[in-house]
């Protein structure tokens, strides 16, 4: 009797809609896209252009630095040759002047390095900004709830459906929308250069 009661209770529970699982309601569709940010940046015409322009400026800076270093070496040689010809005070003054020139060159090098780093950051930042706008536009058009950024080893995608990888589309649109970028190089001594 007790056994029949348990079976009846189980049957009543399974037949009761309150206990049943609603199979008509589906889980919300989750659309996730994937973009290889490094590949997009590596393939970006604007990023490549900016890097070339900065490298040209870096080379020009290096040429100027080499000339200034040569002047310092020449000054050192002159100082060594003048050692016996000058009195102590004149020698000390020349040595102080040479050290100041050396410090000035060090400052010049540091300023130019900072200038190039700033120009690189601004230029590539602009490219990244446009890339993110493109990614957001693609995500909205495809109804994606998330976009994974594949960068180095940060995100490993083990499997994805066809169409979820948007790297090629992002690269194509970025190169179309931003084929080149101006590089602003703000020099500390108020000379402003703009590479086009």
Image (cartoon, grey):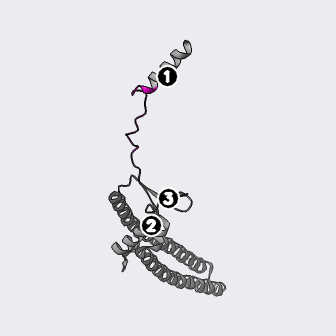
- Name the residue nearer the viewer: 195 or 168: 168
Per the image, the residue denoted by label 3 is: 160
Q: Residue at x 41, y 25 (%)?
A: 16
The Cα–Cα distance between marks 2 and 1, rounded to whole angstroms, is 54 Å
Q: Is residue 94 visible?
A: yes
Q: Nearer the viewer, mark 1 or mark 3?
A: 1
Q: Is residue 67 magenta?
A: no
Q: Residue at x 32, y 59 (%)?
A: 141
Residue 153 x %, y %: 57, 60
Residue 82 in the figure: left or right of residue 127: right
Mark closest to the chain's N terminus, 1 or 3: 1
Q: Residue at x 56, y 78 (%)?
A: 98
Quarter of the view holding residue 128: bottom left
Quarter of the view holding residue 175: bottom left
Q: Circles 1 and 3: CB distance less than 8 Å?
A: no
Residue range of the region highlighted in magenta in the rendering: 14-28
Q: Secondary structure at mark 3?
A: loop
Q: Secondary structure at mark 1?
A: helix
- Name the residue nearer the viewer: 98 or 61: 61
Residue reaching furthest right? 84
- Name the residue nearer the viewer: 153 or 161: 161
Residue 34 in the figure: left or right of residue 98: left
Mark closest to the chain's N terminus, 2 or 1: 1
Q: Is residue 17 magenta?
A: yes
Q: Circles 2 and 3: CB distance less than 8 Å?
A: no
The Cα–Cα distance between marks 2 and 3, rounded to whole angstroms, is 13 Å
Q: Secondary structure at mark 2?
A: helix
* Relative vertical location of residue 77 with respect to residue 109 in this rendering, above or below: below
Per the image, the residue denoted by label 1 is: 10
Per the image, the residue denoted by label 2 is: 167
């Amino acid at each position: 009797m007790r056994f029949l009661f348990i079976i009846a209770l189980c049957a009543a529970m399974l037949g009761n809609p309150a206990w049943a699982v609603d199979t008509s309601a589906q889980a919300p569709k989750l659309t996730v896209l994937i973009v290889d940010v490094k590949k997009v940046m590596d393939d970006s015409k604007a990023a490549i252009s900016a890097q070339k322009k900065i490298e040209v400026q870096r080379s020009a800076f290096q040429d100027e630095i080499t000339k200034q270093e040569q002047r310092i070496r020449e000054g050192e040689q002159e100082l060594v040759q003048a050692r016996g010809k000058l009195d102590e005070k004149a020698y000390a003054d020349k040595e102080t002047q040479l050290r100041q020139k050396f410090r000035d060159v060090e400052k010049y090098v540091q300023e130019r390095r900072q200038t190039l780093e700033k120009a690189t950051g601004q230029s590539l930042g602009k490219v990244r900004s446009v890339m993110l706008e493109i990614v957001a536009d693609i995500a909205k058009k495809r109804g994606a709830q998330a976009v994974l950024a594949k960068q180095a080893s940060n995100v490993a995608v083990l499997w994805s459906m066809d169409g979820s990888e948007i790297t090629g589309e992002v690269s194509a649109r970025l190169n179309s929308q931003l084929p080149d970028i101006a590089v602003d190089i703000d020099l500390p001594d108020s000379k402003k250069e703009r590479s086009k």
